[in-house]
Image (cartoon, coloured by chain):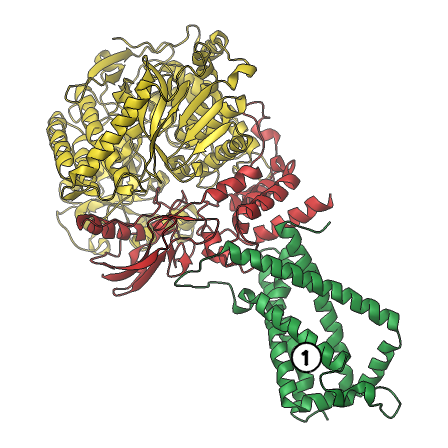
């Protein structure tokens, strides 16, 4: 099939950037979206043009490195699917596709579709962990975790840190990302000790990294390729209230 | 040169304790004076950087990804082994040790494997304390599942994302140290050279992937945790960015490369659909418990699977290995699939695939049971292929997915360059010629959490902190070399793309140095690779400049290294006149298709020394002594 | 004392919002007295208790002030966090109402000022002021003022449009406030979302009933 692409091209952080039209020819339905971009790029290189820069790594939907906005939807139109697992069979011959980078103040564009998501790391750095030391920990079975809690923590822990939630949020908020980590650790007995401090410092860091506030639009949940739920944001809010009351 | 693995003397179970006693320590007040470089932030790198940072060292952590949470350890699905014996089913450190040695086809160092087994339990405790949400039973205890190559249930898991959860645990610890200031993080930074001063590793030269700036970092010791080299095959289950560059450039600086031909092929991956393919996706091997593997009896049979009548189907695994049938070991099943496809009987686009048919199982057990057992795998298969495996057979094909070979290290994880330590998949140490399922995560974390902190202190205690700075002539030369290398790549301006070369190299390696190797195929590889490499340096096209984010340039450097490394792999495979584990030479086969080992002549680690650009590498041997296990024919019957 | 954190300020938004919802429920019940001919009596009773009225008014002023202040502050922050929009925008779950809270809020705020000038201070249409026209029992004739006002289609449509803004504001705001308080689970969220939207419609209909029925000359 043949497609028309409008791809955001931006030389660097200071460049204004613009959409550039490309024709993607002879695309097969079995290609992933990234493989389609590979094909376009090889054509560009052969013509001595600069290929489109985009982040990608594992190409099996788990590393979280790839994340683009396709036709206004971060991680593309397929629900609970990352771009690398989005196959071209979901598009039709002759389709026009807009490809833009994840947009948020906290995600400055580095080049084309590549953005800097270091701000998410810094949210984790502020307290998104349990302060263990290597060695000197109790036996794994010394800490019993009810199965339901373990399952809930795992639901939250599935976040791949791709930033689609931020890009989808009208407010550029990282609340879903932050809430997923807060929920994972607050649900496990190991994480309770630091729970109060964690929720406060992480939400504070979120603001100082330039993310917006949650507007309860739930756009994040709709875009999340891993099905992380906004109930975790409610859980974060409860943890916050609890922290302030005790 | 006969290599000394520096294994401690004494009984097996006392060796590690003994070594810990012997080794020198660095006092708490002195630790902050030492700077350690850790390259790679997968399981091994992240756990090492976090642990060393917490101990008080100054750590510089590097990764080419945008954040340390993306190392390819994250893709490991199944689980992590540990000899906890929670289910009381007879597991023990000894049994895990035995299973790993046997699984590795007796080509690993006994003492290393024993140490790995003995710290395995600590890894689980550590991960639990970090908040890794392992599966639990209803009473709240840790749950175990069984895995291939073992008769006990010792695999801990977090749904199908164990690697992800363990990596995020290590990443959390690393983030904590970054905030504490003990670790400095350098994301989107690629190591392009190891710098040695007076024969010792004292730093690295890197390229900032955003600005293109080439700079150097000096340190008192360097740890490489840069993963495996499976992408030499181009198509593999590894991440697109996984590469051999860091390890290979250390090899060029004098570190020996051990057993490069030991690569593992996984039998149940989703087949290639076309030239554009960038990645192969692995599906759990458990599918073979209920699926039947077959191809049409006739060549070039283009009919739909359902239109091929029973008598015209060849259930080749059941036919060739009646005792094991569809559950034949990984390597045997993989090779058999390749054979039938070579005969022209493969199915699907390109004819590189065999059917894995669940029709019988669905008739016997009902679709519900199959959905319960493999629902998520069927979904994943449908997402990628758009085929419903409940109604038509799956198509599968083997794919490379792990490399047991790597930089040679002694018992202390130190390479032949003093001060250069190698961790995780990047070293060769623990898996011999074949790795058991759920053991990769175990090894990466054992190295990073529980071993490197002791052994690196032993080295550091003998050095003066901060003895060398990056103004040293060796650093200057290294930066010039790197700049010259990238400049050369950019100047060629030929006609073929980097991916084009990678595809051709991959095909060549897969055909000749893949899962079934022969003297002829290896010799052919050894003549074809240099030709392809020569063409690469004349005809590759890399656009853009070196002073910007340039993904083509990054990839070109990696492919350039693969084009040299492939030759080393083929040379190692050619020299090893035996079959063992993942290395299968068609000349050395038992009547039942199992690998025919030659313990008399090849019971050693083959470690190769770089001798210069156009010179053959020199082989060094580390004899393997088995004092505690008896060498036996590997058999899973 | 004043919250500076993201969640803290949103909790203020949720708390003040919910209290104001309670107020508008009370207010609409008060409105309903007009159907039973009790509006003048209701108004007279209220004004017979100045301390109650004034403490109520003070409370409302505080609620409004906080709600408006943090609403604007959060919105400015949110807009700054998303400086560039997509060329091709595609909402999956966000609604027009949710995205335009600050604008519907501004309409409601402006309306509020007008509404106070109209019916409380009674300066916009001095001819209709209840304070100047007593009913037969000597009470200020609020009913006359209301009916005469809404017979003016211009005034009626200002009220209608403003109540539309209120409806939009509440259709996002009610469910949102529950989420902010953390009173949501996977089961309850869809219910709360629907209940919030339903309550917003009910309040909207209840509020526009008076002007619409008057304008249509059903209530005279």
Q: Residue C160, position in %: x, y?
A: 62, 81
- State the SS at label 1: helix
Q: Residue A231, position in %: x, y?
A: 58, 53
Bin the neighbour count of mark 1 within 10 Å (Cα to Cα): few under 14, some 14-19, many 20 and up. Answer: some
Q: Residue A245, position in %: x, y?
A: 73, 46
Q: Chain of mark 1?
A: C
Q: Picture quarter containing residue A160?
A: top left
Q: Is residue B420 left or right of residue B527?
A: right
Q: Nearer the viewer, residue B514 or B241?
A: B241
Asked if B573 appears above or below B327 in the picture, the reply is: above
What residue is disc 1 on? C206
Asked if B249 appears above or below A24 in the picture, the reply is: above
Q: Nearer the viewer, residue B493 or B558?
A: B493
The chain assigned the colour yellow in the figure is B
The answer to whether residue B312 is seen in the rendering is: no
Q: Which quarter of the rendered picture does the C terminus of chain B lie within?
A: top left
Q: Picture quarter containing residue B69?
A: top left
Asked if C168 appears above or below B222 in the picture, the reply is: below
The chain assigned the colour red in the figure is A
Q: Nearer the viewer, residue A219 or A91?
A: A219
Q: Is residue B367 left or right of residue B170?
A: left
Q: Is residue C5 left or right of residue C60?
A: left
Q: Picture quarter containing residue B624?
A: top left
State the residue lying farthest toward the top. B10
Q: In the rendered image of this protein, which colour is used for chain C?
A: green
Q: Residue B550, position in %: x, y?
A: 29, 42
Q: Nearer the viewer, residue B37 or B286?
A: B37
């Amino acid at each position: 099939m043949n497609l028309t692409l409008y791809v955001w091209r931006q030389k660097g952080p200071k460049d204004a950037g613009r959409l550039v039209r490309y024709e993607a020819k002879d695309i097969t339905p079995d290609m992933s979206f990234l493989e389609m971009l590979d094909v376009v790029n090889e054509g560009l290189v052969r013509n001595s043009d600069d290929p489109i820069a985009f982040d990608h790594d594992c190409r099996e939907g788990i590393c979280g490195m790839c994340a683009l906005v396709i036709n206004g939807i971060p991680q593309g139109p397929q629900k609970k699917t990352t771009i690398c697992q989005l196959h071209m069979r979901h598009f039709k011959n002759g389709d026009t596709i807009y490809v833009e980078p994840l947009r948020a103040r906290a995600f400055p564009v580095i080049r084309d579709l590549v953005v800097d998501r270091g701000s998410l790391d810094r949210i984790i750095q502020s307290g998104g962990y349990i302060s263990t030391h290597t060695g000197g920990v109790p036996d794994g079975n010394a800490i019993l975790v009810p199965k339901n809690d373990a399952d809930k923590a795992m639901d939250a822990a599935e976040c791949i840190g791709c930033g689609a939630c931020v890009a989808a949020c009208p407010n550029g908020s990282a609340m879903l990302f932050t809430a997923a980590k807060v929920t994972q650790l607050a649900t496990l007995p190991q994480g309770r000790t630091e729970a109060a401090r964690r929720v406060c410092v992480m939400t504070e860091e979120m603001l100082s990294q330039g993310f917006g506030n949650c507007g309860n639009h739930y756009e994040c949940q709709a875009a999340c390729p891993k099905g992380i739920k906004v109930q975790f944001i409610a859980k974060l809010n409860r943890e916050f209230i609890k922290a302030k009351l005790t | 040169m006969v290599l000394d693995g520096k294994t401690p003397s004494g009984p097996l179970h006392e060796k590690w304790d003994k070594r810990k006693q012997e080794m020198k320590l660095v006092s708490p007040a002195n630790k902050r004076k030492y700077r350690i470089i850790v390259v790679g932030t997968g399981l091994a790198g992240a756990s090492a950087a976090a642990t060393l940072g917490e101990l008080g060292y100054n750590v510089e952590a590097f990764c080419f990804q945008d954040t340390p949470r993306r190392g390819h350890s994250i893709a490991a699905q199944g689980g992590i082994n540990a000899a906890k014996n929670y289910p009381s089913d007879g597991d023990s450190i000894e049994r895990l040790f035995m299973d790993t040695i046997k699984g590795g086809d007796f080509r690993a160092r006994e003492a290393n494997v024993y140490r790995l087994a003995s710290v395995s339990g600590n890894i689980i405790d550590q991960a639990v304390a970090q908040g890794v949400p392992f599966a639990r039973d209803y009473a709240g205890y840790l749950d175990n599942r069984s895995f291939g190559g073992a008769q006990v249930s010792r695999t801990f898991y977090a749904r199908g994302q164990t690697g992800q959860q363990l990596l995020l645990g290590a990443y959390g610890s690393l983030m904590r140290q970054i905030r504490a200031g003990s670790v400095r993080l350098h994301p989107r930074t690629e190591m392009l050279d190891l710098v040695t001063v007076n024969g010792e590793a004292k730093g690295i030269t890197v390229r900032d992937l955003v600005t293109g700036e080439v700079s150097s970092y000096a340190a008192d010791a360097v740890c490489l945790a840069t993963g495996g080299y499976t992408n030499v095959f181009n198509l593999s289950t590894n991440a697109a960015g996984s590469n051999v560059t860091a390890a290979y450039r250390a090899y060029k600086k004098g570190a020996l490369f051990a057993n490069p031909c030991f690569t593992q092929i996984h039998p149940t991956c989703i087949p290639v659909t076309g030239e554009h393919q960038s990645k192969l996706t692995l599906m759990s091997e458990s599918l073979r418990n209920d699926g039947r593997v077959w191809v049409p009896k006739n060549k070039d049979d283009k009919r739909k699977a359902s239109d091929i009548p029973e008598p015209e189907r060849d259930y080749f695994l059941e036919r060739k290995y009646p005792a094991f049938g569809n559950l034949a070991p990984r390597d045997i099943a993989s090779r058999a699939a390749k054979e039938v496809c070579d005969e022209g009987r493969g199915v699907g686009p390109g004819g590189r695939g065999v059917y894995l048919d669940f029709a019988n199982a669905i008739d016997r057990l009902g679709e519900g049971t199959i959905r319960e057992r493999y629902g998520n795998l069927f979904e994943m298969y449908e997402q990628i292929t758009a085929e419903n495996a409940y109604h038509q057979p799956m198509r599968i094909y083997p794919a490379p997915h792990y490399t047991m070979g790597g930089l040679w290290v002694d018992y202390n994880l130190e390479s032949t360059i003093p001060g250069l330590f190698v961790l995780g998949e990047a070293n060769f140490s623990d898996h011999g010629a074949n790795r058991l399922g759920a053991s990769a995560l175990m090894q990466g974390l054992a190295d990073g959490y529980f071993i490197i902190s002791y052994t690196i202190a032993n080295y550091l205690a003998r050095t003066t902190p901060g003895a060398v700075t990056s103004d040293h002539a060796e650093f200057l030369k290294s930066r010039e070399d790197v700049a010259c290398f990238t400049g050369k790549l950019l100047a060629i301006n030929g006609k073929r793309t980097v991916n084009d070369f990678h595809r051709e190299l991959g095909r060549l390696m897969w055909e000749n140095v893949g899962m079934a190797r022969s003297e002829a195929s290896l010799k052919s590889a050894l003549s074809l690779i240099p030709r392809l490499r020569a063409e690469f340096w004349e005809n590759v096209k890399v656009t853009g400049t070196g002073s910007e984010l340039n993904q083509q340039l990054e990839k070109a450097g990696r492919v350039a290294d693969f084009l040299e490394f492939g030759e080393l792999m083929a040379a190692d495979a050619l020299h090893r006149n035996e079959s063992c584990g993942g290395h299968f030479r068609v000349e050395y086969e038992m009547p039942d298709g199992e690998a025919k080992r030659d313990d008399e002549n090849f019971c050693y680690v083959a470690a190769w020394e770089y001798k210069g650009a156009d010179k053959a590498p020199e082989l060094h041997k580390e004899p393997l002594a088995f004092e505690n296990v008896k060498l036996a024919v590997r058999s899973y019957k | 004392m004043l919250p500076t954190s993201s969640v803290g300020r949103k909790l203020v938004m949720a708390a003040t919002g919910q209290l104001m919802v309670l107020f508008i429920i009370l207010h609409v019940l008060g409105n309903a007295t007009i159907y039973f001919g009790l509006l003048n009596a209701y108004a007279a009773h209220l004004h017979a208790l100045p301390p109650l009225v004034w403490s109520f008014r003070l409370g409302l002023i505080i609620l409004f002030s906080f709600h408006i202040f943090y609403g604007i502050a959060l919105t400015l922050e949110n807009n700054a966090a998303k400086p560039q929009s997509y060329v091709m925008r595609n909402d999956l779950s966000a609604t027009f109402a949710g995205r335009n809270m600050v604008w519907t809020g501004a309409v409601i705020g402006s309306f509020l000022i007008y509404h106070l000038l109209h019916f409380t201070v009674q300066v916009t249409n001095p001819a209709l002021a209840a304070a100047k026209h007593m009913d037969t029992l000597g009470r200020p004739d609020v009913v006359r003022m209301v009916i005469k006002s809404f017979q003016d289609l211009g005034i009626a449509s200002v009220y209608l449009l403003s109540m539309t803004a209120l409806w939009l504001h509440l259709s996002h705001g009610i469910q949102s406030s529950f989420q902010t308080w953390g009173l949501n689970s996977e089961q309850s969220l869809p219910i709360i979302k629907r209940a919030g939207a339903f309550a917003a419609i009910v309040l909207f209909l209840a509020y526009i009933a008076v002007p619409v029925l008057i304008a249509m000359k059903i209530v005279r």
